[in-house]
Image: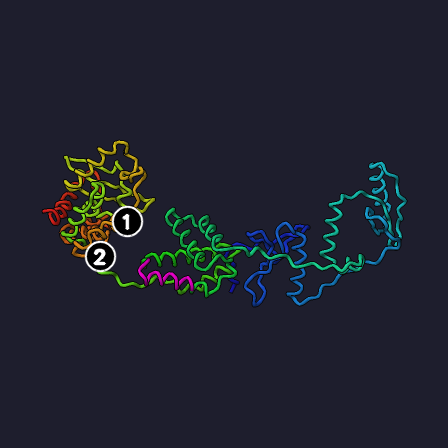
C-alpha cells in the first residue's frame, strides 16, 4: 500500500549561505528564528534569536541540534603557521601551484599594477604565502563574529579571553489584555457596537484583577472576576445579559489570541482554560408584566412637557424602546390619506428590521406641534433633541421616567412599573388579535419565512391602521 500523501503546504526552511536549506530551522511571523520541531516534554518551540541575527541563529540552531541528538561538537584546530602574523590586514594561504595557475595569478597581478610573485610549482609540501589586501573594518568584525559563534573554543585559546555567549532573549512577554484586545479588533474586525462592548469588557476585567501581564494572570484572577460579576447580578445592580456579555467577550478575545496571535498563543490558551467557569448565568425568566390603563394615564397626566408626553405615547403606540425613539429622524414620517405613520426601513449595518406604525390622533397632534416648534430640524437630523440642542439619549429618557415614577408612585396600581412595560402592553394587547407577522412588524422584529405578505408595507401601510385602532380602543375609549 503506498504511503499516505502529506497534507498541507511543505515546511519552508532557512537557507545557509550556500543556498541549501537548513532542515529544521524556520522563521516565525513574530520576527524570530524557531525550530520546526519541538523538544520532548516542551510545548514551546525553542527560538534562536531575531531575524536580523542570521549567522547567530544558524550557530545556535546547530548547537541545539547537536545537544538534541546527544552529540558532541568537535572543533577542527588548524596547525599554527610557520611565521607569526603581526598584521590583521594579511590573508594567509597554503597551497601548491601548477604552472597554469601561476601564470594566471601573475596575469591578474600585472593587470592590477602589482609585481609578480615567484610561486612554487609542483612541490608536494604546503607553502605559505603572505600578501597584503585592504579589508573594510565592518567586514573584519563580521568575520570575527562568525568565527566567535562557530569556533568559540579556538577564539578563547588564541585571545586568552574568557568569553561566553548567552542565550538569545525570548520574545517580549510584556503583553497584557489591552494588547490582546487591539489584536482582536484588528484581526476579527467586529462591528462598532461589538468593538465598544469588547473594550468595555476588557476595561472592566482589568479594573477587577488589576493591570497585569498575561504571564501573571492566574486562575484565582478569573475566579475573582467571576465572583465580582455574579455579586452585581445577585444584588440586582446588573442584569444577567450584562454578566453574560462581560463573560463572552473576554473569552472571545482570549480564544482569538490563542488561535492566531503567536506571541501570546500559549499564555492566552492557558488563561482560556480557566474560563470554563465563565458561563452564561441561568436566571428564571421574569413574569411578563404590562402597564395598566390606569397607570398609563397617570403617567400621561403627571407629565408636564408635551415632548415627554409624546415619548410615552410612542412607547405604547409603536412599542418603542427608549433607544428606538432616539433613532427617529424626520424623514421617517410618512403621510398617506391624511394618516401619519412612522416608517423605519431595514438597516443591515445596524441589524435593524423594517418597521411601520400608524399613529394615534393624540400622537400625531403632539408630533406636529413639536415639529412646528423646531423648524431647524431637517430630514436627515435626529428628530428628538434635548434642551441643549443635542440628540436625545436613551439614558436621559429612562432617567426622566424614573423620576416621574417616584413622584406619582403613591397613585400607581403597580408601583414597580418599568419603562419597558409600555412596549409589553402594546405586544400583549395585540396577541391573537392580529397575525403574528404584523405584531413583529409593529415591534421591529425579524419576520421569518412567509413574510412576503408585508413586502411592500412601507408603500401601502394601511394594514397597520388596524393595529393602531386595537391599541387605541384598549386604553383611550
Image point 56% across, 53% down: which residue?
Answer: 28
Q: Secondary structure at mark 1?
A: helix
The image quarter in which residue 243 lies: bottom left
63 sits left or right of 2 in the view:
right
Q: Main secondary structure of the magenta part?
A: helix
Q: Mark 2 — residue?
A: 416
Q: Is residue 414 visible?
A: yes
Question: Considering only vertical position in the picture, is 461 above or below 171?
Answer: above
**Image: magenta residue range:** 224-237
Report, in whole angstroms, how far the alpha carbon at label 2 lies from the one at label 1: 15 Å
Q: Position of residue 338 (x, y in %)?
A: 14, 35
Question: Considering only vertical position in the picture, is 242 above or below 473?
Answer: below
Query: Depth check: 211 or 192 in front?
Result: 211
The stretch drawn in magenta includes residue 233: yes
73 sits left or right of 448 in the view:
right
Q: Is residue 61 visible?
A: no
Q: Position of residue 403 (x, y in %)?
A: 25, 50
The image quarter in which residue 148 lies: bottom right
The stretch drawn in magenta includes residue 443: no
Query: Depth check: 202 or 87 in front?
Result: 202
Image point 44% across, 56% down: which residue?
Answer: 207
Q: How is the image coloured?
A: rainbow
Q: Position of residue 248 (x, y in %)?
A: 38, 57
Query: Depth check: 61 or 156 in front?
Result: 156
Q: Earlier in the sequence, mark 2 or mark 1?
A: 1
179 sits left or right of 350 in the view:
right
Q: Mark 1 — residue?
A: 399
Amino acid at each position: 500500500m503506498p504511503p499516505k500523501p502529506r497534507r498541507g503546504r511543505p515546511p519552508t526552511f532557512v537557507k545557509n549561505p550556500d543556498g541549501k536549506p537548513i532542515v529544521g530551522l524556520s522563521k516565525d511571523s513574530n520576527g524570530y528564528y524557531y525550530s520546526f520541531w519541538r523538544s520532548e516534554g516542551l510545548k514551546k518551540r525553542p527560538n534562536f534569536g531575531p531575524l536580523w541575527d542570521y549567522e547567530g541563529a544558524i550557530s545556535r540552531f546547530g548547537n541545539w541540534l547537536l545537544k538534541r541528538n546527544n552529540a558532541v561538537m568537535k572543533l577542527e584546530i588548524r596547525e599554527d603557521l610557520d611565521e607569526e602574523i603581526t598584521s590583521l590586514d594579511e590573508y594567509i594561504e597554503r597551497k601548491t601551484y601548477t604552472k597554469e595557475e601561476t601564470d594566471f595569478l601573475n596575469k591578474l597581478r600585472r593587470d592590477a599594477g602589482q609585481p609578480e610573485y615567484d610561486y612554487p610549482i609542483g612541490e608536494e609540501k604546503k607553502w605559505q604565502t603572505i600578501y597584503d589586501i585592504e579589508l573594510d573594518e565592518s567586514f573584519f568584525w563580521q568575520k570575527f563574529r562568525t568565527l566567535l559563534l562557530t569556533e568559540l573554543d579556538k577564539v578563547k585559546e588564541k585571545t586568552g579571553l574568557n568569553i561566553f555567549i548567552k542565550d538569545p532573549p525570548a520574545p517580549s512577554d510584556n503583553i497584557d489584555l489591552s494588547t490582546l484586545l487591539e489584536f482582536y479588533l484588528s484581526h476579527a474586525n467586529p462591528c462598532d457596537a461589538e468593538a465598544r462592548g469588547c473594550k468595555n469588557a476588557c476595561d472592566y476585567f482589568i479594573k477587577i484583577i488589576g493591570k497585569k501581564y498575561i504571564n501573571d494572570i492566574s486562575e484565582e484572577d478569573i475566579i475573582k472576576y467571576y465572583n465580582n460579576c455574579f455579586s452585581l447580578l445577585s444584588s440586582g445592580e446588573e442584569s444577567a445579559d450584562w454578566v453574560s456579555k462581560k463573560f463572552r467577550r473576554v473569552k472571545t478575545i482570549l480564544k482569538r489570541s490563542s488561535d492566531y496571535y503567536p506571541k501570546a498563543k500559549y499564555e492566552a490558551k492557558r488563561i482560556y482554560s480557566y474560563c470554563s467557569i465563565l458561563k452564561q448565568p441561568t436566571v428564571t425568566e421574569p413574569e411578563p408584566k404590562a402597564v395598566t390603563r390606569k397607570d398609563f394615564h397617570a403617567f400621561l397626566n403627571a407629565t408636564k412637557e408635551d415632548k415627554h408626553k409624546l415619548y410615552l405615547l410612542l412607547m405604547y403606540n409603536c412599542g418603542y424602546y427608549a433607544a428606538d425613539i432616539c433613532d427617529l429622524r424626520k424623514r421617517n414620517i410618512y403621510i398617506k390619506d391624511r394618516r401619519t405613520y412612522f416608517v423605519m426601513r431595514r438597516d443591515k449595518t445596524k441589524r435593524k428590521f423594517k418597521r411601520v406604525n400608524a399613529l394615534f390622533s393624540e400622537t400625531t397632534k403632539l408630533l406636529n406641534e413639536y415639529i412646528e416648534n423646531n423648524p431647524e430640524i431637517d430630514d436627515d437630523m435626529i428628530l428628538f433633541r434635548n434642551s441643549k440642542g443635542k440628540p436625545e439619549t436613551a439614558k436621559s429618557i429612562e432617567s426622566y421616567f424614573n423620576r416621574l415614577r417616584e413622584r406619582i408612585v403613591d397613585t400607581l396600581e403597580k408601583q414597580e412599573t418599568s419603562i419597558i412595560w409600555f412596549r409589553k402592553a402594546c405586544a400583549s394587547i395585540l396577541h391573537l388579535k392580529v397575525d403574528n407577522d404584523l405584531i413583529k412588524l409593529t415591534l421591529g422584529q425579524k419576520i421569518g419565512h412567509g413574510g412576503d405578505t408585508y413586502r411592500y408595507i412601507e408603500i401601502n401601510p394601511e394594514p397597520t391602521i388596524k393595529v393602531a385602532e386595537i391599541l387605541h380602543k384598549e386604553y383611550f375609549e
